[in-house]
């Protein structure tokens, strides 16, 4: 019996050695220890063994079973280790490989221009304030010296919500809000960028557009301050060589009022289709704050003076980035927006 078990153990040893997978290992278990397995059969054979040999026989069968179980566990561990090593090898990350290129969004030209204008005025000591897009007639018109039935109201193509409320047609509405909110009636130096709305829609007008308003109120503010500030603004935004000219104009909330033109940045002032051969492009409206507006805002016009200006942000962006159609600013055409990826790196 002993020789027989020795032979069996040798045979098992060989089989474990050549076993290369969990599947094969499990097959071995069935082959030796399954219902009809070699060792199981040997064990069952004990009943035919003479009583005096039963003990030795049993011990020998156990020796075979113990060998199998030990060898099985050892092999199982080894196969598991091999599997983990193989997996680690497959999943090794090559950190020297170039990374995948992710497509990133770009800053919208509208936001770019807002940031630029904000940075510029903040560097000159201005605060940036916000105002509501859903405005009332009071702040958008009345407190800005547009009396009821004033003809200048017609020029604004207003979207009315009801008798009282409207979508603001101009960020000038923020002027009246800022004056009102300043209960101490202390000096003011703010810009108010934001969205505005008018019933307009063509290549140079959109029903929604952006404006930025500027308001300065203090003692002894003069037209010279207005000129100096706007010249600085135009040159910093559009280039030091930009020339600026002031033309008389009319707005109900400023007196005197003016419009400010800059030399066409496309032709440098020589004349081209963009500037309609005049060499000049209109940049903004401005003026000295009307005494009525100061008074309605709670400021004594005998003590305080001020200037205000307002310009279209889309216009500025169109000039600066040579955008031919204002509607491109609002239709989110990916081919248009992508171009500003590159500009971001400038
Ligand atoms: N709100 C005017 C517009 O939408 C622009 C403007 C003109 C603003 C003169 C001002 C100003 O503050 O002083 O056309």
Image (tube, rainbow, N blue to C red):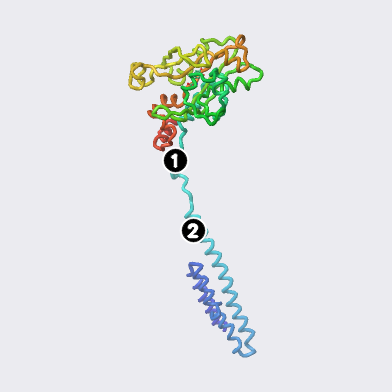
In space, the residues marked 1 and 2 are separated at their CA atoms by: 34 Å
In what quadrant of the picture does the C terminus appear?
Answer: top left
Residue bearing the label numbered 1: 103
Q: Position of residue 148 (x, y in %)?
A: 54, 20
Q: Residue at x 52, y 27 (%)?
A: 168
Secondary element type, mark 1:
loop
Single out the mark in the foreground, 1 or 2: 1
10 Å neighbourhood of mark 2: few (<14), some, or many (≥20)? few
311 or 125, which is in the foreground? 311
Going by the image, does 153 lie left or right of 52? left
Q: Residue at x 55, y 77 (%)?
A: 34
Q: In the rendered view, would you say 268 is above or below 13? A: above
Q: Residue at x 43, y 36 (%)?
A: 332
Q: Position of residue 134 (x, y in %)?
A: 55, 30
10 Å neighbourhood of mark 1: few (<14), some, or many (≥20)? few
Disc 1 beta carbon < 8 A from ligand 1? no
User: Which of the marked residues, 1 or 2, is nearer the chain's N terminus?
Assistant: 2
Q: Position of residue 91 (x, y in %)?
A: 48, 53
Which mark is on residue 55? none
Number of callouts in the render? 2
Residue bearing the label numbered 2: 86
109 or 151, which is in the foreground? 151
Are the residues tagged 1 and 2 within 8 Å (C-beta)? no
341 or 264, which is in the foreground? 264
Q: In the rendered view, would you say 218 is above or below 199? A: above
Q: Position of residue 210 (x, y in %)?
A: 48, 27
Secondary element type, mark 2:
helix
């Amino acid at each position: 019996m002993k020789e027989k078990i020795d032979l069996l153990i040798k045979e098992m040893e060989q089989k474990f050695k050549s076993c290369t997978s969990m599947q094969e290992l499990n097959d071995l278990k069935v082959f030796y220890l399954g219902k009809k397995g070699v060792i199981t059969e040997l064990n069952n054979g004990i009943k035919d063994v003479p009583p005096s040999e039963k003990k030795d026989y049993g011990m020998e069968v156990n020796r075979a079973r113990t060998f199998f179980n030990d060898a099985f566990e050892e092999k199982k561990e080894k196969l598991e280790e091999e599997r983990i090593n193989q997996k680690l090898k497959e999943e090794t990350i090559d950190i020297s490989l170039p990374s995948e290129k992710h497509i990133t969004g770009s800053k919208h030209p509208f936001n770019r221009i807002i940031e630029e204008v904000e940075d510029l005025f903040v560097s000159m000591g201005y605060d940036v304030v916000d105002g509501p897009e859903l405005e009332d007639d009071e702040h958008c018109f009345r407190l800005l010296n547009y009396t009821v039935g004033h003809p200048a109201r017609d020029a604004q193509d207003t979207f009315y919500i009801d008798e009282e409320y409207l979508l603001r047609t101009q960020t000038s509405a923020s002027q009246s809000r800022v004056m009102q909110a300043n209960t101490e009636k202390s000096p003011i130096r703010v810009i108010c960028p934001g969205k505005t709305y008018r019933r307009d829609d063509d290549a140079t007008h959109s029903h929604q557009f952006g404006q930025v308003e500027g308001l300065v109120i203090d003692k002894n503010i003069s037209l010279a301050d207005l000129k100096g500030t706007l010249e600085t603004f135009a040159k910093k935004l559009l280039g030091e060589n930009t020339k600026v000219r002031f033309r008389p104009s009319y707005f109900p909330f400023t007196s005197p009022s003016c419009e400010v033109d800059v030399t066409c940045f496309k032709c440098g002032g020589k004349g081209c289709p963009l500037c309609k051969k005049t060499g000049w492009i209109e940049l903004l409206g401005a003026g000295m704050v009307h005494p009525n507006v100061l008074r309605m805002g709670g400021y004594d016009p005998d003590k305080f003076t001020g200037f205000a200006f307002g310009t279209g942000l889309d216009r500025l962006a169109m000039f600066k980035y040579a955008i031919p159609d204002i509607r491109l600013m609002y239709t989110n055409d990916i081919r248009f927006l992508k171009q500003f990826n590159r500009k971001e790196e400038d």
